[in-house]
Amino acid sequence: MPPAVIANVLLTWISFSMVFSSHIFLFYFLPLSLLAYYCMPRRGKNVLMTLFSYIFYGWSNPLFTLLMFFSTLIDYCCGLVIGYAAPDQQRRRKLGLLVSLVSNLSLLGFFKYTGFAMESYNQLFTLVGIDGFDPVPVLRFLLPLGISFYTFQSMSYSIDVYRRDAVCIRNFIDFACFVSMFPQLVAGPIIRFQEVADQLASRVHSFEKFARGVAFFSLGMAKKVLLANSCGKIADTAFAASSLHWLDSWFGIVAYSFQIYFDFSGYSDMAIGLGLMFGFVFAKNFDSPYRSASITEFWQRWHISLSTWLREYLYIPLGGNRKGAARTAVNMGIVMLLGGLWHGASWNFVVWGAMHGILLGSERMLGKKPFYAMLPRGLRIAVTFVLVNIAWVFFRATTFGGAFDYLGSMFCLAAVPQTSLLLDGLLYTPYTLLSMAVAAVIVWRAPQTWDWTREMGPAKGVVVVGVFICSVAVLSMQSYNPFIYFNF
């Protein structure tokens, strides 16, 4: 084969991410890694897991692995410095923690927020109209996959060792396995070291655990392929339209709410399932969030690993709820603002975080109750869902102005030309209506994957095999297969 052809094949090979819902992962990478893992002696399993994780992560860009290795090495060394410091060497412990925090936040800030900071600087001077202002050239960097997740995860290790909530680890391979573990590497859930420290040293492998892992993975892939992708097409159509009828705009944002939920909870289910297949038990990351009757409850159910991280490492250090209701509300607002910015370098995400921060703060001021607490629980769930949808507009819209235009359509504040009726043929097809109906039933009525897979039997096995075959069949016909949280 000519060298040019080989080069093109290699470039094509590394030009995309290896998502879980892809044929190359399902039929090549996963079977090979499982076969090699179970053939490997116990002492070599973490080495092999780390190797396959680096292959998985470097699939889209091998240079990303160097960055992750650097972050891993820094936090491993900082953990040793902190953990082995004598009781009277507090200054040394603080220095180790500081190096870890500065290194991780610098990496995250450089790759994720440099361009955003420069754009905001230019916009500020343009807005005030200063004469002679020379705009700063905006630098763009390729955002490494999952950098927001693995920096938080790696950084939490140093903090836990400093707090003496965890013992520093001496085996570098075990720590590298913790940071790079491919099931949850690029989109969470965010695993704290103390949750898996014992499992890194020794974990149980059983047929029951493996079977539950397969069920978790299959159901998660069905969420992603059968529901998230179809709902995502509806949302994309609605947000791409120049003008919308109010009913179409609400249909579009509800579709996006379903998309982001099934996309991310589906990924989390697949990650938990893969962990079980390799003997690891990860914590639940979603708990039917759209059944929440308040925003406070919503954040107890949505992306639980991130909520836990923000509470443990940001909210509590700020003072938590120890300094009165007003200060508690302010702390919540700060945490949600930073949580919004963590999701993306855009003012849209800041506004999304601010909206949730204001709602959380107001509920805390009202005694942990929403302003609609007098309503029956069913109506409180409906109001909460509406508020979450309104906030999702800023999360989904690509521009600040686009978010306000979409909100204008939702609340009948925008002119609607007759041509908008053409969208009906794209939005309300039998397939899209069926997808939305099934999504709604699962969101509000179906049992959670976590509970449904606790006990597996022949009947459930048939269901699992059926949804897996159906997902693979649909996947082979789909070209639309994004993972939303890969962008964060």
Image: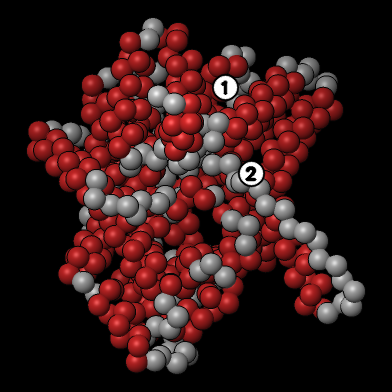
> In what element is the residue under mark 1?
helix
Taking 259 as reference, is 336 left or right? right
Q: Is residue 31 above or below residue 287?
A: above
Q: Is residue 209 above or below residue 256?
A: above
Q: Is residue 208 above or below residue 286?
A: above
Q: Amino acid at mark 1?
A: Phe
Q: Where is residue 228? Give x, y as percent.
A: 32, 56
Tell which tag, 1 or 2, sits nearer the viewer.
1
Numbered circle sitting on residue 175: 1
> In what element is the residue under mark 2?
helix
Numbered circle sitting on residue 214: none
**For the view shown, which residue lies furthest in the front direction?**
2
Between the residue at mark 1 and the residue at mark 2, the CA separation in whole angstroms equals: 20 Å
Q: Which quarter of the figure has residue 375?
A: bottom left
Q: Earlier in the sequence, mark 1 or mark 2?
A: 1
Q: Is residue 21 visible?
A: yes
Taking 98 as reference, is 116 left or right? left
The residue under the point 37% across, 36% down is 272
Q: Amino acid at mark 2?
A: Tyr
Q: Where is residue 144? Give x, y as percent.
A: 58, 41
Q: Is residue 233 above or below residue 101?
A: below
Q: Relative to the observer, which residue lies in front, 75 or 404?
A: 404
Q: Where is residue 191? Give x, y as percent.
A: 50, 35
The residue under the point 82% across, 78% down is 128
Q: Residues within 10 Å of mark 1 (few under 14, many from 20)?
A: many
Query: Which residue is label 2 attached to?
Result: 313
Q: Which quarter of the figure has residue 409?
A: bottom left
Q: Where is residue 278? Give x, y as percent.
A: 36, 23
